[in-house]
Amino acid sequence: MRKIQFYLNRIIGKDKGFDTDQLLLISILLLSIVMSILGTIVNIIMKLGFMLTLLTVISTFLLLLIYFFARIKKWFNISKWLTATVFFMLIDLMWVYNSGSNGPILLILVIFFSIYIYLWDGLSRGLFIAFYFLNCIAQFIIEYNFSYLLTTYHDNKSRVIDVYTGLLIYIALSGIVMIYLKRLYKTEKDNAVKSDQLKSAFLANMSHEIRTPMNGIVGFAQLLRRLDITDEKRLKYVNIIIDSSNHLLDIVNDILDISKIETGQLEVAIEPFEIVEIMQHLIKFYEPKAEEKQLKLYLEGIIEGQKVIINTDSSKVYQILNNLLSNAIKFTSSGYVKMGFQQKSGYLEFYVEDSGIGISSENYNEIFERFRQIEPSNTKQYGGTGLGLAICKSLAELLGGKISIWSELGKGSRFEFTILNHPFTDEQKGEIQRVYITSGSTEFTVLIAEDEDNNFLFFKEALIENNIKVIRAHNGIDAVNICFTNPTINLVLMDLKMPVLDGYEAAKQIKALKPQLPIVAQSAHALTSDRDRVKKEGFAGYITKPIKVEELFALISKFKPA
């Protein structure tokens, strides 16, 4: 029985990722082919006439052809219209050669109507219903006024046999459709209940996940107000507040990202960037956490000084690698965590491997579902929102690739994802030559256009520690004037909302005189519409507040010579 089910699923195409409507169409086509073959056999045995037998043979051939279009070629819209056209044509012809309402054809027409009402939506459904009723009215007029045009049975016994054969076909078709719809309803109902349960568990977990870092921020901020604490304790409290803030920001970003994914608001920004430096930066960022757990953390297969420039969305690649690396370190208590990539024809393959707790094979698909965490106990022990891998999967697919896993309980995991590596345009080739090859400047100067003192102080302290010269502009006019009079500026970090002259207008004026000077927008606005406008205005990049140090340097590394 299992073998029969296996081969039936292969014929229908359940292993090809078709949706429910597509599977129903293929199933109906297969069933119609079988019924058409049986009809041909019955017509031959009962000697119901050459034309009727020829029609069933032709219908079998046409249905096989449409099955090929749907199952093999995956031309589902074409297949639906072809099926409807062929059914109407053949049923009308059979109605003529099968005694009109005295035969079984009208029964088959009813089930045909029911199936297509389910398969179609909107205007297509309306057109189908209208044509169906016009067809029925035409049949009535012809039979009522011109019944002599219809073929009659040889005798009553032939009519009875044919009608009851048609009835059996009708019962079989309607039964299969009803069973299918009931199963579909049950599946959708179970998925809805499961989704509600997952979302309830997710919301309960979110409450815990948000309150935990908030407790660290509020609690240790209060302790910092005490005058009698030592410098050592003060530094410890500050580090806890920073870690808690980063944790809270990660949670907010996960929720925003999954919302954008579900509403289709995530867009891809294809641009050249150097991938090895980003991966090395991630390794450096996670080294302290790895050292705390005595893990060996390293890049695999990277030659010292190697530069690999790729053409895709840098922020999304960074986000996937960051999520996978964070998970690997979180779920590994001893051993190693390694990361690497390979360039292949037209695409890139990245991987993150660890010697952690591992995942059983039956949970491979579940871990990529939204709000999903494999074991409730893991939630308590390791924390997390249950969104990270779902986001990774969606981002990989958005970049034209996919994500996969190999894992074994107690032995570790290996996550691999592929993305498209787009060909460089002529303009991008010129930019690569300028930024990565011919640039020989030893000092790198960044103009910070920022009216808020605390925000500028953050940029200044972060950049100066990394041997980057910093110049400040308090408003848009200052930024324009400084760029016009200072030829040493290599990069502008432009706040979009400033007094006197906003960032958009300031950037426009700077670009008019210095079109090759890269200007990066920095803003607290993170909506898709803001990113779209930044892209249209010709900014070289975009970074949102609150800004993480590692993200800032990953962005600057694209413009700063190594």
Image (cartoon, rainbow, N blue to C red):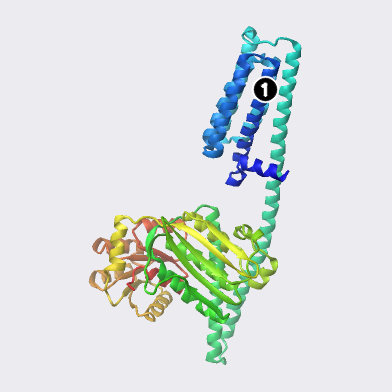
Measured as percent of width and height from the top left, residue 482 is found at 27, 72
Pick the residue in front: 348 or 492: 348
Pick the residue in front: 294 or 490: 294
Pick the residue in front: 169 or 102: 169
Measured as percent of width and height from the top left, residue 221 is found at 57, 81
Compared with 9, 327 (above or below) is below
Quarter of the image for residue 42 reads top right
| Residue that label 1 marks | 41
Quarter of the image for residue 141 reads top right
User: Of the residues shown, which amino acid type is indicated by label 1?
Assistant: Ile
Q: Is residue 231 left or right of residue 466?
A: right
Compared with 492, 59 (above or below) is above
Compared with 364, 86 (above or below) is above
Quarter of the image for residue 280 reads bottom left
Q: Is residue 370 visible?
A: yes
Farthest-out residue, top: 148
Crowding near pointer 1: few (<14 within 10 Å), some, many (20+)?
A: some
The residue positioned 32% from the left and 65% from the top of the image is 518
Pick the quarter of the image with the N terminus: top right
The residue positioned 67% from the left and 18% from the top of the image is 44
The residue positioned 61% from the left and 9% from the top of the image is 149
Pick the quarter of the image with the C terminus: bottom left
Label 1 SS: helix
